[in-house]
Amino acid sequence: MEGKRHLLECYARIITSYRMVVILLVLCVTIFLGMRIGALKIDTDPDIWAPQAHPYVKTTKTLEQVFGGRNVVVIGIAPKNGDIYQPEVLAKIQRIQQGIEQLPQAVRHNILSLAARKVKDIRAASDGMEVRRIMERVPQTPVEIAALKAAVASMPIYINSLVTPDGKVAAVIADFKTDKAKPNYTAMIQALRPIVEREKDATVDIYYGGLPMHGYWLEFHMKKMPMYFGIALLIIMAVQFWSFRSLQGMLLPMLTSILSVIWGLGLMGILGVHMDPMNSTTPILIMALAAGHSIQILKRYYEEYYRLRTADAMPARTATVEAVVQSLVRVGPVMITAGMIAAITFFSLYATGIVMVQHFGVFAGCGVLGALMLELTLIPALRSLLPAPKLREIEVERKVGILDRFLMWVAANIAGGRAHLFAGGAAILMAIATVGLFFLHVDNSVNNRHKPDSEYRVHNAALNAALGGTNSLIFLIETPQQDGIKDPHVLQGISELQAFLDTQPHMGKTQSLADLVKRMNQAMHGNDASFYTIPNTRDLI
């Protein structure tokens, strides 16, 4: 122990002797890392939320490669009077469809509505069946409107997905690709909104739903984090000023906190780590941890300075430097141990395999190490350079406050033979907390991340009430041979899977290739409802 103290004392004297060099070096590092903060980007890519080695995640990537994007936005168009089978409303659907198709990030073949080219009307014909677009142009006459209604009613696959059974709401389902260089949804939704918003008027309500909308609003709130950081900064500064009653006692710990955040953010920029929903709150965590550690050594500095000035009658300037050295010698080991434990704990999160948690662990761990380095270099150098605190400030800081009296009362009772009462109380609290563990539940609801009256939840509720839903679960069916999907047994299996899913709670709508094959088979047999089945032969399929 004496050896460690001697080593720390030598170190502290070097820092105080070459304080200007230390301050200059810290300033250069801060400028270098601060310039890298501009490389940070907001990242709400779904990949960062899940372990990439998981089979479900791998399947999702395969789906994206084979079929296109996986960022589905559901746009609901609800007339305030009547149903959607009005020329003006149908024209709005058509314009929205065409507008989205022009967006570069849109997956054109996955954009579906009554106005889409891929949405077909399959009907019986004298030579088998006839397939045509369900709405080649916007119908104008009552006869044309009735024909469209009949065509939609004959295609169960579109009911509750593109239009409600009562025709009160229609949907445009749009799929998008994300730019890996800009892994966020803001640009995507900002390009989509003008196309949709220009169709909003006094005749219709328009709703948005889907995961990209959640990402968009999440990013919107993430951009407010600097404001929350500022609020937390002011609160911590107020607490420190109340504790030390001096500007130095307030500002020095905050300097450590702010520089620690700059160092952490700059390191993220160098490593190419983006700001995601979890680590966007980490600057506040780093600031609080750094301020807490700085207060420990600052408190000890005041105590050492008071002792040296009063008991040893040391001159103010000499006492200032010596107090810095002695406070670092006595509190340094505790700070280093606590800082290393915190950093290692955060770094251990890298083993989770979840990118967002890994980013949080690395960012928080680097922030703690940065704070520790600053507390062992910049703060002693600055403290030895600044004017000595006035004895009046020291006297104010030494006054016994409410918290001091409470802690002294606790210590007196524990030392006075009542330790068993405190231990018993702690045991009771632990028992209550242990029981509470059984009431915890996992809540990964996207809805619960937004306020009940937010646009996201209001729109999502409206779409879920009217249509099949805004949360999609996709099953990838893969066969070992070419055209294996045309096997009657495979299609029948898909149909049976749908039938099972339809019996599950919260299921709004199921769709698959089997629905189209069954409808074609029915059309080939004169629209006989008994032939709404999977054909028995591969050739017919």
Image (cartoon, rainbow, N blue to C red):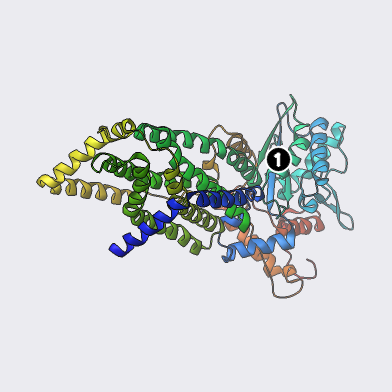
Front residue of 402/443: it is 402
Residue at point 87%, 32% (across, down): 141
212 displayed left or right of 113: left
State how many labels appear: 1
Residue at point 62%, 45% (across, down): 215
The furthest residue to the right:
127
Residue at point 72%, 46% (across, down): 173
Q: Is residue 193 visible?
A: yes
Indicate the amino acid at tag 1. Ile
Q: Position of residue 264 (x, y in %)?
A: 54, 51
The furthest residue to the left:
417
Q: Position of residue 504 (x, y in %)?
A: 54, 52
Instruction: State the image quarter where residue 511 is shown.
Output: bottom right
- Dot 1: what SS? strand
Q: Position of residue 184 (x, y in %)?
A: 66, 48
Q: Is residue 236 visible?
A: no
Q: Quadrant of the N terminus?
A: bottom left
Q: Position of residue 256 (x, y in %)?
A: 47, 45
Q: Quadrant of the C terminus?
A: bottom right
Q: Which residue is mark 1?
A: 75
480 displayed left or right of 243: right
Front residue of 176/191: it is 191
The furthest residue to the top:
202
Q: How many C-alpha atoms fall within 10 Å of the one at disc 1: few (<14), some, or many (≥20)?
A: many
Front residue of 45/439: it is 45
421 displayed left or right of 138: left
Instruction: State the image quarter where residue 495 is shown.
Output: bottom right
